[in-house]
């Protein structure tokens, strides 16, 4: 008996829904409860401390609380365990939000996925992991998304350059690894890169190699242009680049015994034509660029299980930061892309706009405060200038008064002298 297509579609949907699994989810919604689920490594004694915070600006004061780095110039090493699983035959989706509200100058914002046999109390930078994914920023040159897979004990970096976000807002990072050996990287729910493991990582030897037996024939001419054999250099070509200045004259006071032999200054020769080169013509014997023949690489063996990790069981935050303040939140590991999409909408999607608005309001308020402070400084400066002007005016008035008093004294002295003279005459 044949079932209608619609019913088959419903059954298929149910099957997919039943198979969908969330292996790990962390939103830090229970206050300090996270401390019972996360383990601080003791490999170093001075690892940076984490604190629960929504930051200086946020979309939701509670929902946006995550783990925030709190000490500058520190390594951080924290991890959480979950029920081990294998991604054989199904996708694995790694997703989280991250906010660099401290205007990060150099530091990691990635997560590492470890096998379940990891000793969490001894996790460190050289601990072998399965996957490393997320943004890494250091100066102006490094602003990329790491996608690193471990294959047969070796870490392999993606050959493509994926740019990360470097602003202060929260962003959603998603990595999808499929059982058909393909992958996809999303930032803020938008695909930014995709491809295949074999093409974008050097996990396997190349399929083709240059034939070691092949050599370019000795008579192979790969020069597209050659010198024109019929072209000759003109007889008047060889003029010097510089000549003595014809207008230069020896100074009258030039003393050869003291100053040496006088020589005129050199100037550019207007007749100089540069280095002569014959004209170029098409090479009649040109055969094109020689392409080294390739052969199948005897060391290449396809591997349809490159994507597979058998014992996924720990998510770790193992990174270095110069300036602290980064917040990790909404961590998810699942085998269902739709589940990750919905989780992203419910978390980052719901708070991104309110967060942006709050940040803009804070910046606007800070700008106004700066303007008011600037105005206040200007007023103080103007007041000081006015006081100085008043003081100068007072000083000038005092000087004028003193001069007037002196003149009056001089007048009085003159009168007295005249009185004495008159008395003497009498």
Image (tube, rainbow, N blue to C red):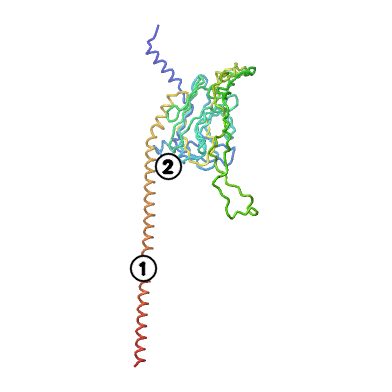
Between 14 and 96, the one nearer to me in the picture = 96
- Observer-side mark, 1 or 2, equals 1
Can you say which quadrant of the picture contains the N terminus?
A: top left
Residue drawn at point x = 45 percent, y = 30 percent: 187
State the residue position of label 2. 56
- Neighbour tally class for label 1: few under 14, some 14-19, many 20 plus, Cα within 10 Å: few
List x then y, in percent, for residue 142: 52, 35
Q: Is residue 390 above or below residue 213?
A: below
Q: Is residue 307 visible?
A: no
State the residue position of label 1. 394
List x then y, in percent, for residue 303: 57, 18
Residue drawn at point x = 39 percent, y = 9 percent: 3
List x then y, in percent, for residue 422: 34, 89
Residue furthest top in the image: 1
Q: Is residue 390 above or below residue 90?
A: below
How far is disc 1 from disc 2 in space, using C-alphas? Answer: 53 Å
């Amino acid at each position: 008996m044949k079932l209608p297509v619609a019913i088959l579609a419903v059954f298929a949907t149910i099957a997919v829904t039943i198979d969908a699994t969330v292996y790990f989810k962390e939103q830090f919604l229970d206050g300090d409860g996270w401390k019972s689920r996360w383990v601080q490594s003791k490999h170093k004694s001075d690892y940076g401390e984490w604190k629960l915070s929504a930051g200086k600006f946020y979309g939701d004061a509670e929902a946006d609380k995550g783990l925030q780095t709190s000490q500058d110039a520190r390594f951080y090493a924290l991890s959480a365990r979950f029920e081990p699983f294998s991604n054989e035959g199904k996708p694995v989706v790694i997703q989280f939000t991250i906010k660099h509200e401290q205007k990060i100058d150099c530091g990691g914002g990635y997560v590492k996925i470890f096998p379940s046999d990891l000793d969490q109390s001894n996790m460190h930078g050289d601990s072998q992991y399965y996957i490393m994914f997320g943004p890494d920023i250091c100066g102006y040159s490094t602003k990329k998304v790491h996608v690193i897979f471990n294959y047969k004990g070796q870490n392999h970096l993606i050959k493509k350059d994926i740019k990360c976000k470097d602003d202060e807002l929260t962003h959603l990072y998603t990595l999808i690894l499929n059982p058909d050996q393909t992958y996809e990287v999303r930032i803020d729910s938008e695909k930014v890169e995709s491809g295949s493991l074999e093409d974008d990582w050097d996990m396997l030897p190349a399929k083709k190699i240059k034939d070691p037996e092949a050599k370019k024939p000795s008579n192979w001419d790969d020069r597209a242009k050659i010198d024109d054999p019929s072209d000759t250099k003109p007889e008047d070509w060889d003029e010097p680049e510089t000549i003595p200045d014809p207008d230069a004259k020896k100074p009258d006071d030039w003393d050869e015994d003291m100053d040496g032999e006088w020589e005129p200054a050199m100037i550019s020769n207007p007749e100089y034509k540069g280095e002569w080169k014959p004209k170029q013509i098409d090479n009649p014997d040109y055969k094109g660029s020689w392409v080294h023949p390739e052969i199948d690489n005897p060391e290449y063996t396809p591997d349809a299980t490159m994507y597979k990790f058998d014992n996924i069981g720990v998510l770790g935050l193992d990174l270095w930061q110069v300036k602290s303040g980064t917040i990790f939140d909404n961590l998810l590991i699942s085998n269902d892309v739709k589940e990750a999409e919905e989780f992203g909408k419910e978390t980052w999607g719901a708070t991104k706009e309110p967060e942006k608005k709050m940040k803009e309001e804070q910046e606007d308020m800070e700008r106004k405060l700066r303007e008011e402070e600037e105005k206040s400084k200007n007023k103080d400066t103007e007041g000081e200038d006015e006081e100085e002007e008043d003081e100068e005016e007072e000083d000038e008035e005092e000087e004028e008064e003193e001069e007037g008093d002196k003149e009056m004294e001089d007048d009085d002295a003159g009168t007295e002298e005249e009185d004495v003279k008159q008395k003497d005459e009498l």
